[in-house]
Image (tube, rainbow, N blue to C red):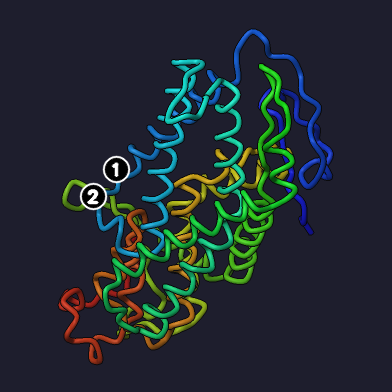
Amino acid sequence: MYSDPVFISISVTDNASDPDRMIGGEVPPTDWRSLEPSCILILIITGKVIMNLFIFRARQSYVSGSLMGYCCISLAIVDFLLLFTIYVIHYFQDFNLMGFRFTTYHVCLFTQIVSHTYGILHVPFFLASGLDYYLTVVLFIRIPCSRLLYTACVVLLWTGAFAYVFLSPAASLELDADQSSYQCNFYISSQSFYLSISLVCSVLLLLILCSFEMVTFLKSLKVITYAESTVVLFSLPTRDRWPVRGGKCFMTALLFSFLGTWAPFIGLQIIIFVLCAHIPGYMDMNVPWLYFMNSFLIAVSFGLKYPDLQVTEKTFSRDPFIGWKYCVLPFMDAEHNKAMSFLKESPSSVMII
């Protein structure tokens, strides 16, 4: 298991294929004197900030409706603050502010601090959001002052992570080390590596367990155009019964909806594992990765709640990427959920992704 911080140099261009390199050691740096690390960092983090804006713009629906949504917003804010800070330092090169002297060395230093902080927040974000969905979806508990509570929880997580980085002896040794003008070492998250493997393996295992139902669904696949949108229809086996019963059938419906959006991302994760690619912490923690975990947790919550599905429109809107409504609707008992407005639609034993 990982116990010590692992750092990677930004000047690395040739990643070895040895699997052990994923979990230990520092990669020997090469000379990139032709391009300063600060320029590379500004370009990379600028691209990350633009990606954050694009995601929030593309999926505006209820971005902050859950704890994970607040985590995504906070991550985007920290990304922007990091970009602004290193750009100002890179532009002025050497200046004093409130009695503190800032030089180009601090570009590496601040990015190292943020990178290490990102690297230890994967599991806390995952567990905190999992608890949130367990309470609100599985137990169906209404949390009072949820926005204030989510904000306080996110601030607490970030504060604890930054405190750990500054108080950790191993991290302090690395952050205080004398850096040259062209070398900059960054933390590689062990949490991200193990968590990513766990999620991908869980999806693949479920895909194997529901392989027969998957084939049945694929045989009934239809693609139609409705209201100027492309709709994928899967006829369920029991067309004359509402709601549809069957745990495996429900899991298959959830899996189809999940893979319909995140299959390319899962493929990217598998490629990273195969190539043993080194991803610095400031790149590894990103908004798409958090939304991937968000969709996974929502699917798990629906699976734990089945067959007593009691969800609201607000629950469905917590995932701005997947329309869980039409996936879960055929499995909900309309007689016991008449108060829910979205169940006023005429029942149809089809799944829509």
* Badge 2: residue crowd in 10 Å (few <14, some 14–19, many ≥20): few
Q: CA distance from mark 1 to mark 2?
A: 21 Å
Q: In the rendered view, tell whether residue 337 sits above or below residue 239.
A: below
343 and 282: which one is in front?
282
Tell me the SS state at disc 1.
helix
Residue 172 location, quadrant: top right
Q: Position of residue 241 (x, y in %)?
A: 32, 85
| Side of 166 where 273 appears, left or right | right
Q: Residue at x 76, y 19 (%)?
A: 30
Q: Nearer the viewer, mark 1 or mark 2?
A: 1
Where's residue 124, x and y in %? 55, 63
Q: Looking at the rendering, in which quadrant would you find the C terminus?
A: bottom left
Task: Identify the mark at residue 58; answer none if there is no mark.
Answer: 1
Residue displayed at 62% across by 71% down = 209
Tell whether 235 sits left or right of 165.
left
* x and y percentages locating residue 21 in the rendered image: 81, 40
Identity of the amino acid at label 2?
Thr
Q: Identify the secondary structure beneath mark 2.
A: strand
Residue 191, label in figure = none
Q: Choose between 163 and 48: the one closer to the eye.
A: 163
Relative placement, left or right, of 169 versus 145 is right
Q: Which residue is mark 2?
A: 225
Graded by Cα atoms within 10 Å as few (under 14), some (14 to 19) or many (20 or more), the crowding at tag 1 reads few
Q: Earlier in the sequence, mark 1 or mark 2?
A: 1
Amino acid on which disc 1 is placed: Ala
Residue, far top = 34
Q: Toward which corner of the image does residue 33 lie, by quadrant?
A: top right
Residue occupying the far front of the picture: 99
Q: Position of residue 64 (x, y in %)?
A: 30, 58
